Amino acid sequence: MARPLVLACGALVAELRAVLQANGLTDGVEVRYLPANLHNRPGGIVPGLRELLATHDPDGDRTVLIGYADCGTGGGLDALLAERPNLHRLPGNHCYEFFAGTPVFEAMAEAELGTFYLTDFLAKHFEALIWQGLGLDDHPELLPDYFGHYTRLVLLSQSPTEAIVAAGQAAAERLGLRFEHVHTGLGQFDTAVTVVLHPTRKVA
């Protein structure tokens, strides 16, 4: 039987490797990544996944974990899953939700609607993915258009270091937002991954 296949967002490399290693799955699965900058161009996610599936699972006979939530595909990812019963994706609408867990994320969102979220990866790559990705390096005058209705930035950290927290604080300052730090760890993500790749594992 072919090894399970993981097709994941490039922003999850460190976290996915950590979970696979912690569960003894590193050698038992094949992992392929799509570029992390699709975070800003979610219309490319489903076509990119189709290309990887055509190459690595042409017959649809492998267990495949799609390392994305909906992630801005507007239901397009779920439509792809409906075509192939062997596909499974991460829960929720985005990485903030599957890292924090739905109840925690929904509580944060309800408490303050004008919240901008960063993960460890997005904090480390804020300049390239957010500032330059939104064109603010060339047109800083657009900052109020993008962030005028936001009031705080929340760093949802997986494995925080002083450098990551400092990067989150610097991002908040640059955007003119109040900074908060919430440590999510990898527990919710671990469960979402292993329930597909290691279904016999007992989840606490």
Image: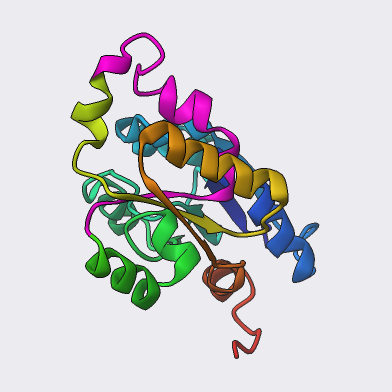
Q: Quadrant of the C terminus?
A: bottom right
Q: Is residue 56 visible?
A: no
Considering depth in this image, is 57 or 176 the residue closer to the camera? Answer: 176
Considering depth in this image, is 158 or 136 the residue closer to the camera? Answer: 136
Magenta stretch: includes residue 116: yes
Q: Report x, y in % for residue 31.
A: 65, 47
Above-or-below relation of 20 to 164: below
Q: Quadrant of residue 49?
A: top left
Q: Report x, y in % for residue 15.
A: 65, 55
Above-or-below relation of 30 to 183: above
Residue at 22% in and 58% down? 113
Residue at 24% in and 52% down? 114
Q: Is residue 115 left or right of residue 101?
A: left
Residue at 69% in and 43% down? 163
Q: Report x, y in % for residue 102.
A: 36, 72
Q: Quadrant of residue 32?
A: top right
Colouring used for the render? rainbow
Q: Is residue 40 left or right of residue 145?
A: right
Q: Quadrant of residue 2?
A: bottom right
> What's drawn in magenta, residue-wise?
113-141
